[in-house]
Amino acid sequence: MITPPHHTTAAPVLSDSFGRVINNLRISVTDRCNFRCRYCMPEEGMVWMEKSELLSFEEITRVTRLFAELGVTRIRLTGGEPLMRKDLHLLVEKLSPLPGIRDIAMTTNGFFLAEQARLLYKAGLRRINVSLDSLDPVKFNLMTRRDYYGKVWEGLHAVEALGIRPIKLNAVLIRGVNDDEIGAFAYLARTKPYIIRFIEFMPIGLGDGWTNEKVMTSKEILETIEHETGKKLVPVERRGDQPADRFTFEDGLGEIGFISSVSEPFCDQCNRVRITSDGKLRTCLFSLGETDLKQLVRGGATDGEIKLAIKDAVWKKEPGHLINQPSFTRPERTMSQIGG
Ligand code: SAM
Ligand code: SF4
């Protein structure tokens, strides 16, 4: 039996029982959202958490500091829509100076960026991923059930104006819905300094209508790009802790990335864990269990006690998700409730 490293006193690295080093923490700051993306949540009937259930900025900062002391170096703010949380830049201001945190990023639908990008940048946010599933305003409405295409582009232009590079767009393609836009996305990545990351459609939304047939796999998308552009994509060396397979065009400015969570899961190299907006630690997006850090934080636990709970949970991180296997069980919470 292997002994978890935390049962000795020196544990400079947060690792699990499979030897994976966990240095990446995704922090959800809210489950609320002003969009209703078809693959994520239904048009009506979402029930939001009580605001008092959400970790406060002070609580998030404390928990993040403890993760940093255990070895986490990179964090990503997400949700729900993270910018639904009022004054998010104040949280970034608290997180930026934490010793050990080298990188703060955010995933957003982009709606509030036009107003908030500057404040976030000043507070220390340097990397922003904007989710954009269509480059056609009509189809954008169909995907998000909102008429906000112009607003998202205002946000992207604000990010561009701040000099934040690269600008990353996340796109989920669903067969028969927006898979006809591969060429348009490829054109954007060739002509602008944008990184387009195609994320495979996963069974994690509420009312998402997921079936395996609707998943546009990375391989199919890559082949379509090469066919439509008549050019071979050039592989870029994968950074150690990045889940995306990256490619450039010989004659392009930007980049294409593929996150093949369904067709080629990267679980054996997974370096991340998540905390939900109500303070539950999840060691996988598809975990069937959680560790309640909020209860510890609000119950007066010491830093040492919370760190022990984190280390114990991380040590038991599951080997991988089971999408496409008969024993796959959807988690009780959806992507927006967990933090995407
Ligand atoms: N609201 C923010 C946004 O949309 O960027 C952050 C949260 S959202 C849950 C994070 C990411 O998860 C988005 O890029 C979204 O496209 C992706 N996502 C949501 N549901 C998904 C699903 N069923 N399959 C694949 N990706 C999904
Ligand atoms: Fe909102 Fe993001 Fe889900 Fe779309 S993917 S509904 S923007 S949380």
Image (cartoon, grey):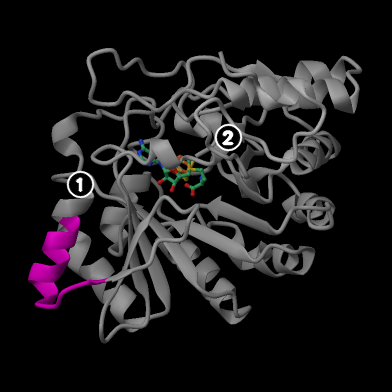
Indicate the position of residue 59 as horizontal and vertical percent values. Answer: 82, 33
Q: Quadrant of the N terminus?
A: top right
Q: Left or right of 274: which side holds 148?
A: left
Gap in Å between the C-alphas at discs 2 and 1? 24 Å
Q: Which mark is residue 187?
A: none
**Residue type marked 2:** Val
Magenta highlight range: 221-234
Element marked by disc 2: strand
Tell me if residue 227 is in the magenta stretch: yes
Q: Nearer the viewer, residue 91 or 311?
A: 311
**Residue type marked 1:** Thr
Indicate the position of residue 32 as horizontal and vertical percent values. Answer: 58, 35
Residue 36 in sight here: no
Q: Nearer the viewer, residue 244 or 241?
A: 241
Element marked by disc 1: loop
Q: What residue is rendered at 59% in x and 81% in y?
A: 161
Indicate the position of residue 284 as horizontal and vertical percent values. Answer: 49, 29
How packed mark 1 is, by other alpha carbons closer than 10 Å (few <14, some 14-19, many 20 or more), is: many
Q: What residue is rendered at 33% in x and 36% in y?
A: 39
Residue at which label 2 appears: 273
Nearer-N-terminus badge (2/1): 1
Tell me if residue 288 is in the magenta stretch: no
Q: Quadrant of residue 296?
A: top right
Q: Given this view, does label 2 or label 1 mark the residue nearer the observer? A: 2
Q: Is residue 207 above or below residue 113?
A: above
Residue at which label 1 appears: 217
